[in-house]
Image (cartoon, rainbow, N blue to C red):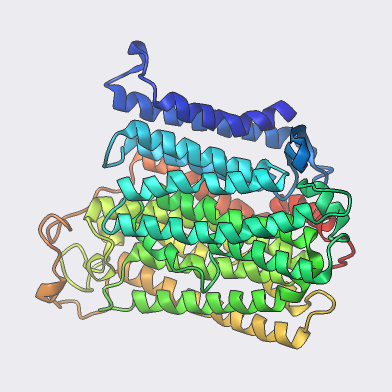
Amino acid sequence: MRLLLAAVVALPLLGAGAALLPAPPGLRGRGPEQAVLRHGVTVTGAVLAATAVLALGFDHDRPGTMQAETDIAWIPALGVRIHLGTDGVSLPLLVLTALLTFLCALYSYHRPPEGPRPQAFVALVLLLEAGTLATFAVLDLMLFFLAFETVLIPMYFLIARWGGAGRERAAWKFVLYTLLGSVVMLLGLLLVGLGTEGGPTFDMTALAEDGGRGLTHTTQVVAALAIGTGLAVKTPMWPLHSWLPDAHTAAPTVGSVLLAGVLLKMGTYGFVRIVLPVVPDGIHTLAPYLAAFAVTGIVYGSLACLALALPGARGDLKRLIAYSSVGHMGFVLLGVATLTRTGVNGALFANIAHGLITGLLFFLVGAVKDRTGTTDLDRLALDGAGRHGGGAALYERAPRLGGLLAFGAVASLGLPGLAGFWGEMLALLGAYHPADGLSRPAYLVFMAIAALGTLLTAAYLLVVVRRVCMGSPSAPDAVPAPDAVPAPGAVPAPGATLPDVRGPEFAAWIPLVVLTVLAGLWPAILLGLTDPAVQNLLPGVSR
């Protein structure tokens, strides 16, 4: 198991290097481009298989105990170690990362990216996977920081070289925001690691067991603020979110799936793994402010989506889903800010649910853009006859694609029985009874505001389904105004049908649908893993 976890982290890194080498003549297939895309599927498939074996070999009777550990001295003078391990908090994120990266590689094999050399594309995706898996597997603060920063390089190039309109500006904005946050986070990590009583150590498990006893209250507050700021940028938390809509809108489909499904989870994971157990007094002081920012993000993200979804707003469907992530991740941060087992379990559950559902939605939006040439909501609202209303839009032109998009939307709004419901509900329950010492009246207000956000979320997602899947609610014989008619080649001619979901697309998307339903109907799959681990991270918390 120890070697298996190390292999899960190392395999994509080795695969990234191999992707840049010439393919052996017997493995080129139709050409070197197909060979390297097949290489990406093979490596990510092997990583997924290794992760599945790791999950099957995991001792599910002791999910709160760190397992598959590797602990080797690296820089003894600073107490930095190569320390790997997994428990009930990190294991679901490892599986989610391996799954989404494999599905992205499979999707890219059948629909190669438009842009420069695919060898570089595959190498960057594998490097991104290696950095993300390392973030969830390492148990040393310095290694965590290095892995946390590693993902910036591949994501920057994926956006800048294979993205759409405005890609260079979006890529720079993504890097600058995250780098500035990371500088502040590094200062907080150093403050914690160098300020311990027994000498410098950056070992997360040792720091968590110590519980900040060697740090003064002021030091804990400063460290929690510094580390939390860096993590909040990546989450993203309002008002540090403004890089996200541009990055998602400009990124290629695979980039958007990985950014929403995996990279955003690194920030919230850092809150649970580092901030809560290592500086508990500091986060207790800052928790009400974190909750206030979280619920502001929930309402802000929902209102921004509603404004984009309304007819005539010329809203972009991809941008709308990006703003929806601000709201959904707000529920994750609210759960963390309650400092309760219920709330933190809800945050971890919502993390996984958001990765599954939003990953599916970005896949679907990419497919819509591939078929229609646009993600403009006003253009997508045209029915098969080129009219506003009167037809069924996607339901008429590509019914399976429309059905999957509607499923993703109702899952995202938190319909009971699907994965999106449980994380939000547990976060709200955590706010109803926050941790001792936190103001319950304030958290009841936060809970009410977050509940309003769920209503706004349902409103904009139902509007999206009504317009994109069923057609705009205009008169049946209404003809679109000249400025609303798609440019030649952007949207198929009036009356034309669209290619519906193909076999390779089903293969990439159906696992996400199945897992969304499974997690919604059987939440104990995740909660049985996370709850014992959360108890270890929050000792003394009874609920």
Q: How many numbered circles are shown?
A: 0
The quadrant of the picture occupied by the N terminus is top right
Left or right of 206 on screen, residue 510: left
Residue 522 on image: x %, y %: 68, 54
Q: As displayed, is residue 90 above or below residue 45?
A: below
Left or right of 209 on screen, residue 143: left
Residue 39 on image: x %, y %: 42, 26
Residue 44 on image: x %, y %: 50, 33
> Dividing the picture into quarters, in which one does residue 485 lie?
bottom left
Q: Residue placed at 76% from the left, 52% from the top?
A: 193
The quadrant of the picture occupied by the C terminus is bottom right
Q: Residue placed at 44% from the left, 69% from the top?
A: 242
Left or right of 394 on screen, residue 476: left
Q: As displayed, is residue 259 above or below residue 115?
A: below
Q: As displayed, is residue 480 above or below residue 355?
A: below
Residue 261 on image: x %, y %: 51, 52
Q: Is residue 415 visible?
A: no
Left or right of 350 on screen, residue 460: left
Q: Nearer the viewer, residue 239 or 417?
A: 239
Q: Residue placed at 30% from the left, 27% from the top?
A: 33
Q: As displayed, is residue 214 above or below residue 163?
A: below
Q: Is residue 350 visible?
A: yes
